Amino acid sequence: MQIQPIRNEDDHAAAVARIAALMGAEPDTQAGEEFDILATLVEAYESKHHVIDAPDPIAAIECRMEQQGMTRAGLEPIIGSRARVSE
């Protein structure tokens, strides 16, 4: 097991590829330990360099409505009047 810090995108890509190769590794084995360590390193790198902003609340609701095939009328029983849904 040769683990090194993830300092750039090439290191990141290599770590992700190694994680993919270790998928299914049994816990408490050398491969399982390597998987856990690499996953922790990748998570730390991604949280710093690949930040995903929270979606706009309205856009998130509209996206979920589209996924479920809902219309604004379908929100009325949940939220209230048609005017409230439009807000």
Image (spheres, grey):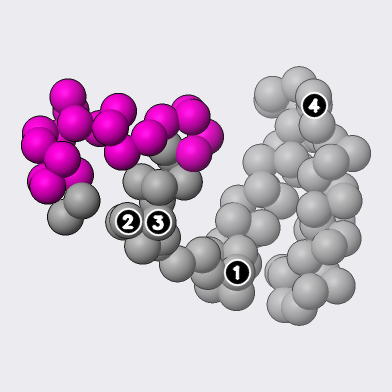
Marks 3 and 4: which is nearer the front? 3
Residues at circles 3 and 1 in contact by the CB criterion of under 8 Å: no
Q: Which residue is mark 3?
A: 59
Marks 4 and 2: which is nearer the front? 2
Q: Earlier in the sequence, mark 2 or mark 1?
A: 1
Q: Which residue is mark 1?
A: 50
Residues at circles 3 and 2 in contact by the CB criterion of under 8 Å: yes
Q: Residues within 10 Å of mark 1 (few under 14, many from 20)?
A: few
Residues at circles 1 and 4 in contact by the CB criterion of under 8 Å: no
Q: Earlier in the sequence, mark 3 or mark 4?
A: 4
Secondary element at image label 3: helix
Mark yes or no: residue 73 visible: yes
The residue under the point 79% across, 74% down is 9
Q: Which mark is residue 58?
A: 2
Q: Which residues are magenta?
A: 66-85
Marks 3 and 1: which is nearer the front? 3
- Which amino acid type is marked by label 3? Ala
The foreground one among 43 and 85 is 85
Q: Which mark is residue 25?
A: 4
Query: Residue 84, percent across and down?
Result: 11, 46
Secondary element at image label 1: loop
Real-space CA distance between mark 1 and mark 4, rounded to the nearest whole angstrom: 26 Å
